[in-house]
Amino acid sequence: MANSTHGHKPRTPAAHRSRRWFLNKSLLAGGVSAVAVMGGYAASQAGAETTSTADAMASASPTPSGPPPGGGFGQTIAYDDFVGVTTDGTVIDDLYAIHRTGVSTTPVVRAGAAFVNSLTDDQKSATLYDIDADQWLDWTNVDSNDRDGLALRDMTEKQYKLAIKLLKAALSARGLENATQIRKLNHYLGEAGGDTSKALNYDAYWFTIMGTPSATDPWGFQFEGHHLVINYFVLGDQVVATPTFRGSEPTKITYDGVDYHLFREETAAGLKLLHSLTDTQLATAAPGTETKTGTNLTVGAGNDNAVLPYKGLKASELNRRQQKLLLDLVEVYTGTIDDGHSRVWLRDIEKHLDDTYFYWIGESDDDSAFYYRVHSPVVLIEYDAESPLAYHEDGDTSSGGPNGTPTQQHIHTIIRTPNGNDYGVDLLKLHLETDH
């Protein structure tokens, strides 16, 4: 495989991958975060990093807000062992192809190159990876400082602005706003616990770059931190933005005089589709054979090769209006990347609409804690209202923990590209077969 033109790091050793996984489990169990030193541009914002409020302390605990075991603690695998999510262990062939989309990637290529060019040699050594690096798969959404790359908090002011410009080029306005709000409420948890110097702060999010930003050659970036992980692969004018994990605890709160209500659209779009179903359709989409637990998410971190059979109601059994509602739901997730590539992505998903399944676990009131899944050969979306780990509205911690009562105040979501194209892996294989 070709290396980054700025040098490359060796693939993450298996021992490191295992160490990181067990560390994250211990963080969740012990309620502490790994130690890191704040520096760079973010350190100049120290006044904003150390403020603590009485209201926050009264309503939240210092326990990390990562996923309970089972929803995101699978073992990280090597890039060469990646298969992707399948329904039975067998990848469906010929789902993806290298083609022209007609949507420019010039803005994100330029933003990526400008960010890379701003790095020092030491920063490049820590941040730049081969295009086929294990780093792609070595991510977690828990609040850990055991991450590779360069954190926002350790950047100079110029680097910080260029990093945010890269996110802005890759994401839609809605996607960028959601990411910013997730980071802000992560900082809220740090204030609530009395320590924002570690993983629970606004700028405890890391960039790594795979390959070299290019208009023709494959490259991409990973933006990783607590409750927010964006994998973004670019090949020519094609983009693959999966897996992308977005979550928050809490999701609805007034903080620093600003009202936040994260994942309102994801919640409402799921309910709208469910409420459109007939009794006969509901019996298949929401059969009630599974219980809504503290976590029902199945394809979180470390579950890149998950085997997940289809469940629920097939979209071919929906009427035209219901199919439109299903696509509206999907667009809430695909619409977080820049608008042109979002439309391309949605059209690709629509081609497999008849083979798309919708599945639901839990109640269906506006404030219910529920789980839903949208699953086809080319897209997998999970939404999961989980049990509280760090935020307790009434101050009662007895309902918290991995097996606690789920609530809409702790939501995890993920979108993947099944059958081998998470991280753009299938496109990279095709590129190497045809162009190299």
Image: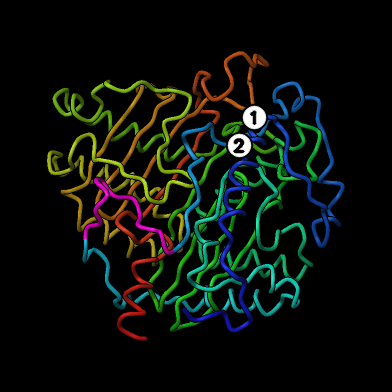
Q: Which residue has dot 1 on it? A: 29
Q: Which residue has dot 2 on it? A: 25
Q: Residue furthest front?
A: 15
Q: Quadrant of the C terminus?
A: bottom left
**Range of the magenta residues?**
80-92
Colour scheme: rainbow
At 73% from the left and 35% from the top, the residue drawn is: 32
- Asked if the residue under mark 2 is in contact with the one under mark 1, i.e. CB atoms within 8 Å, the reply is yes
At 76% from the left and 25% from the top, the residue drawn is: 55
Q: Residue 241: x percent and y percent?
A: 44, 60
Closer to the camera in the image, 72 or 16? 16
User: How many labels, in total?
Assistant: 2
Q: Residue 110: x percent and y percent?
A: 56, 79
Determine the secondary structure under disc 1.
helix
Q: Amino acid at mark 2?
A: Lys
Q: Tell me: 341 left or right of 400.
A: left
Q: Tell me: 118 left or right of 223.
A: right
Determine the secondary structure under disc 2.
helix
Q: In the rendered structure, does residue 336 fall within the stretch colored magenta? A: no
Q: Amino acid at mark 1?
A: Ala
Closer to the camera in the image, 150 or 307? 307
Image-quadrant location for residue 149:
bottom right
**Looking at the picture, does residue 215 appear above or below residue 300?**
below
Q: Residue 320: x percent and y percent?
A: 15, 44
Image-quadrant location for residue 249:
top right
Image-quadrant location for residue 402:
top right
**Looking at the picture, does residue 434 appear above or below residue 65?**
below
Closer to the camera in the image, 335 or 38? 38
